[in-house]
Image (cartoon, grey):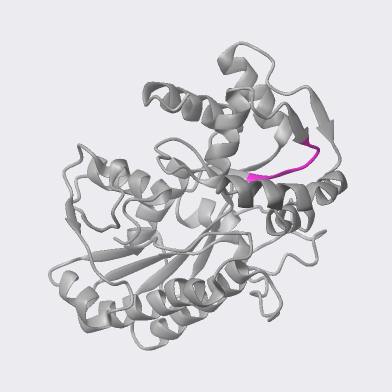
Amino acid sequence: MTGGSGHVGGNLVRELISRGYGVKCLVRKDTRALDGLDVELVQGDLNDASAMGAHMQDVDMVFHAAAFVAVERVDESLMERINVGGTRAMCEAALSASVGRFIHFSSVHAFSQMPTDRPLTEDRALVSDPDAAPYDRTKAAAQRVVMGACDSGLNASIIHPTGIIGPNDWKPSRMGAVIQDIATGQMPIILRTGFNWVDVRDVCRTAVNCVEMGRKGQNYLAPGSWGSMKDISDAASEVVGKKTAYLQLPLWSAYLALPFAGISSALTGNRSSLNKGSLHALDVQCRDIPGVLAKEELRHASRPLAETVRDTIDWMRSNDRL
C-alpha cells in the first residue's frame, strides 16, 4: 500500500493486520503511525512505475492511499505530479505486475458540489473546471486515470471518503489539529458551519471489504454524517469535562479574517486552518450524501460523530498529544 505512514494509511494497516493480511508499505520519513506494527517498510518514488512494479511482485492487492492533501494554494505542479502522475504510475505498475485487486482512495472533493441541494451520489459529474481547487481537480483527474486503467484490464475500485477524522493521526491532519485545538481550549471561537465527517476506521474497514465485495470500475462514496463545528466542540467538552467553545460566528465573518490568518501563518511558519480553500469547501458543499451503494455492496457503516471525537481525544491523551 502507498501512504502507509499517513492518517488513512496507519489505520488501514491496522485493519489489514487484524484480518490476517501481511502488509508492505511505501512510506516517507515519518513512520510513527506504523511503530510497533508487523509491516514491511519500503521507500521509493511513487512516480517510478518500474520501481513500484518491482515492489508489487507477489502482491495480491494494492491500496493506493498516498496523496498530496491540501485545500490552500500550494505548488500545483507538485500536487499534479503526486496525485495524478503517481496514480498513473501505480496503475501501470499494477498492470505490469498482474496485481489481482487495486483499491484507489479518492475523495468527495473529486465530485462537483453543484447543485448542492440534491443528493450527492456516485453518478455525480467529476470536477472539470480548470479554475477549481487544485486538490479537487487533481483527485478528479486521478479517478479518470484509474477508470482508464480499468479499461486496460486493471481490477480496480474507488473509495470516496467525506471529511476524515479519527485516531492514529500522528502528523496531524488538518481536522486532527482542529480537534486538538478545541480540546485544549485554544479554539474558543468556532464557525457556524460543518461538514460530513466520517471515522477513518470506518473508511478503512469499507476499503478492505471492497477487495472482495466491490465491483471492477465502480466508485463508492463512504460518508459518515453531517455535523457542525458546535457538534464537535460539544462532543469534545463531554470528554475533557469543560466547555471548549464560547462563541459561534457566521461563516462569512471568517472571510474577513483571511488576510490576518495569512500573515500569522507566514510569520509563524504554521499552517493555518483558515484559508480561502477551506472556507470554500465549507461554503459550497452537499449535505445529503447517502452512500447507499457502499452500504449495500460493501457493508459500509459509520459510527456516531461523538464516538469518533471521544476516541480521537482519548488517543491524543494516550500519545501525549494533549
Q: Which residues are magenta?
A: 191-196
The reply, left or right, for residue 85 in relation to residue 238 is left
User: Does residue 133 lie above or below 221 as drawn?
Assistant: below
Q: Nearer the viewer, residue 135 or 152?
A: 135
| Magenta stretch secondary structure, dominant | strand
Q: Nearer the viewer, residue 215 or 9?
A: 9
Most extreme residue toward the front, as rendered?
Answer: 267
At 53% across and 39% down in the image, what residue appears?
176
The reply, left or right, for residue 314 in relation to residue 60 is right
Q: Nearer the viewer, residue 225 or 25?
A: 25
* Residue 78: image location, x then y, percent: 47, 73
* Residue 124: image location, x then y, percent: 67, 70
User: Does residue 211 lie above or below 227 as drawn?
Assistant: below
* Residue 224: image location, x then y, percent: 59, 44
Q: Residue 195 magenta-drawn?
A: yes
At 31% across and 83% down in the image, what residue appears?
92
Q: Residue 1 magenta-drawn?
A: no
Q: Nearer the viewer, residue 191 or 153?
A: 191
User: Does residue 108 lie above or below 15 as drawn?
Assistant: below
The reply, left or right, for residue 7 in relation to residue 118 is left
The reply, left or right, for residue 212 in relation to residue 194 is left
* Residue 2: image location, x then y, percent: 32, 62
Rendering quarter of residue 105: bottom left
Most extreme residue toward the top, as rendered?
Answer: 241
